[in-house]
């Protein structure tokens, strides 16, 4: 079969070694291994100019583009379709730190930088880049921005959207839109960067970003508590916020089934309490000053919580190693679920006050409708963001179970709508929820989104089939 002329032209731009047409398996499937595609090629540009030239070639040949970062997304948003006609553009070679400005508290970095590298870069100048997710060792900042990633410190520092001051974007036409400003105040018309943040690669390719840096806390304290119910956890959240104020940075709810599942697949992880409890909360506080002073305040707040019967039991870590191990228990929940069985995931947000009633009502409904199913409920309770994942009954068949996907989603998402929540708090829409979105957004809101998409991408080449159909 004749090779598509795009391939030779792309080789001219990025070099032979950076146009892949064989062994594409790793780029053709998502992290959950739910979506499988077949790209025509994977192109790995090494600079913004190369990205722009490749995008122009795609536009010329009317070839659809699928941007791909670390490929850790949860909604199949970075997976090509199976037509063999889509070009995956992967950003990993764009991984330079362009500048770090500690006085302005900013760094300007390329899209393919791995999140953990950026956390380390910030730390090397005594600053914090606070985005923190379980996938931070492989996800890339371009992917974080394109998904408006959340994670475990949103409570204190906000979502990725709150951490981005400027962007550089290659538009679907191949033009480079330079919005790389490091300004905290700039009211000069529409703030275009926000269009691209959370757009899941459907409006353009992010090539660089100017990110906010925060003061690096010199002290931190980590603790885990056992609680009787999510309602107690919400009361505890209020109590801890009152007690710790701005120092409070993470508040992660975990049900006993998710803790036990994670420990089953990672037996070296700690068992924080001698006996099992129904619910746990993992907390972190951070501040300037000393660990001893911060831990004393943290401990006092937790003692009050014990006295007020908000918590059943408390563990405060005594070393960085213990703190790290507790966080590993949290960070490995996705991997444990992945190893266990394919589950039907939900990434929802609700007003925090409504979370306990939602959990009670919807857990009961799922147990009745899908007898024997196993609910793994955990999440960023401080932000009202739950992961409410349903796995097959033990001993039953994976494929048969996944046939319930739409029925399970219907139960959970209908309840989310009743509680005025969102069907996607942090993972995005991708291809997973593209058909559901019209049920939960008004026709007008969707039409405004389509108008923006048509204006920027009239040929509909950027990540088609994701977010909007
Ligand atoms: P990819 O998966 O490669 O792509 C995601 C989307 O962004 C796709 O639409 C893709 O087309 C687009 N994209 C990628 N790069 C660019 C670019 N340069 N320009 C334009 N579009 C681009 N997410 C959270 O929000 N919070 C969590 O706590 C969290 N925890 C996770 C834990 C684990 C173990 C795993 C596997 C995932 C987790 N995620 C979490 C999901 C995922 O890591 C995030 O969505 C992350 O931001 C995706 O980054 P990525 O580089 O892997 O993007
Ligand atoms: C997390 O909070 C991620 O750990 C992944 O958002 C959630 O595995 C999941 O469902
Ligand atoms: Zn999450």
Image: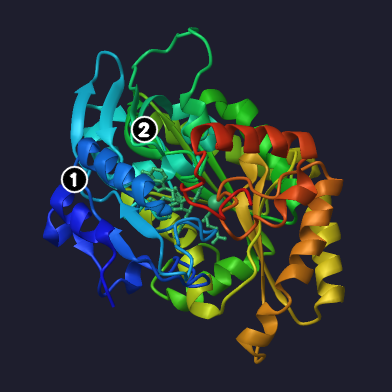
- In the depicted structure, whether residue 377 falls above or below residue 84: above
Q: Is mark 1 within 8 Å of ligand 1?
A: no
Name the residue rendered at 18%, 38% in the picture.
96
Label 2's element? strand
In the rendered image, which quarter contains the N terminus? Answer: bottom left
Label 1's element? loop
Q: Is mark 2 within 8 Å of ligand 1?
A: yes
Q: Residues within 10 Å of mark 2 (few under 14, many from 20)?
A: many
Name the residue rendered at 66%, 38% in the picture.
237
Front one among 99 and 393: 99
Distance in Å between CA atoms under marks 2 and 1: 15 Å
Residue 238 at x, y percent in the picture: 69, 33
Colouring used for the render = rainbow
**Mark number for residue 46?**
1
The residue identified by callout 2 is: 169
Name the residue rendered at 79%, 70% in the picture.
407
Q: Is the Cβ of the residue at disc 2 closer than 8 Å to that at disc 1?
A: no
**In the image, is 298 to the left or to the right of 12?**
right
Front one among 62 and 312: 62
């Amino acid at each position: 079969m004749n090779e598509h002329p795009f391939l030779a032209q792309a080789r001219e731009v990025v070099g032979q070694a950076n146009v892949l047409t064989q062994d594409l398996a790793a780029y053709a499937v998502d992290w959950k291994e739910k979506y499988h595609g077949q790209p025509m090629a994977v192109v790995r540009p090494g600079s913004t100019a190369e990205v722009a030239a490749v995008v122009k070639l795609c536009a010329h040949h009317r070839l659809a583009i699928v941007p791909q970062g670390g490929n850790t997304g949860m909604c199949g948003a970075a997976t090509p379709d199976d037509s063999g006609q889509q070009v995956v553009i992967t950003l990993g070679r764009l991984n330079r730190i362009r500048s770090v400005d500690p006085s302005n508290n900013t760094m300007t970095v390329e899209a393919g930088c791995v999140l953990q590298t950026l956390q380390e870069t910030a730390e090397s100048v005594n600053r914090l880049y606070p985005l923190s997710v379980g996938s931070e060792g492989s996800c890339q900042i371009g992917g974080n921005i394109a998904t408006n990633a959340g994670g475990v410190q949103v409570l204190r520092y906000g979502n990725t959207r709150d951490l981005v001051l400027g962007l550089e974007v290659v538009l679907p036409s191949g033009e480079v839109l330079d919005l790389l400003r490091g300004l905290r105040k700039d009211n000069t018309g529409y703030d275009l960067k926000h269009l691209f943040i959370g757009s899941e690669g459907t409006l353009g390719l992010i090539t660089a970003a100017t990110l906010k840096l925060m003061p690096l806390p010199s002290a931190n304290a980590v603790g885990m508590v056992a609680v009787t119910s999510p309602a107690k956890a919400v009361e505890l959240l209020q109590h801890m916020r009152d007690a710790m104020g701005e120092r409070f940075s993470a508040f992660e709810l975990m049900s006993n089934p998710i803790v036990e599942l994670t420990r089953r697949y990672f037996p070296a992880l700690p068992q924080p309490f001698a006996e099992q409890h129904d619910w746990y909360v993992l907390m972190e506080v951070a501040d300037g000053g000393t660990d001893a002073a911060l831990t004393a305040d943290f401990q006092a707040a937790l003692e009050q919580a014990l006295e007020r019967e908000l918590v059943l039991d408390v563990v405060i870590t005594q070393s960085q190693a213990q703190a790290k191990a507790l966080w590993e228990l949290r960070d490995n929940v996705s991997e444990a679920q992945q190893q266990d069985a394919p589950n039907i995931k939900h990434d929802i947000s609700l007003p925090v006050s409504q979370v306990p009633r939602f959990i009670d009502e919807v857990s009961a409904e799922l147990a009745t409708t899908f007898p024997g199913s196993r609910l793994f409920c955990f999440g960023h309770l401080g932000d009202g963001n739950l992961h409410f994942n349903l796995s097959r009954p033990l001993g039953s068949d994976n494929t048969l179970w996944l046939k319930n996907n739409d029925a399970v989603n219907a139960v959970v998402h209908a309840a989310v709508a009743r509680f005025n929540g969102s069907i996607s708090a942090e993972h995005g829409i991708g291809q997973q929820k593209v058909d559901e979105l019209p049920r939960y957004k008004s026709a007008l809101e969707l039409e405004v989104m389509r108008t923006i998409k048509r204006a920027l991408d009239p040929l509909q080449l950027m990540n088609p089939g994701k977010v909007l159909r």
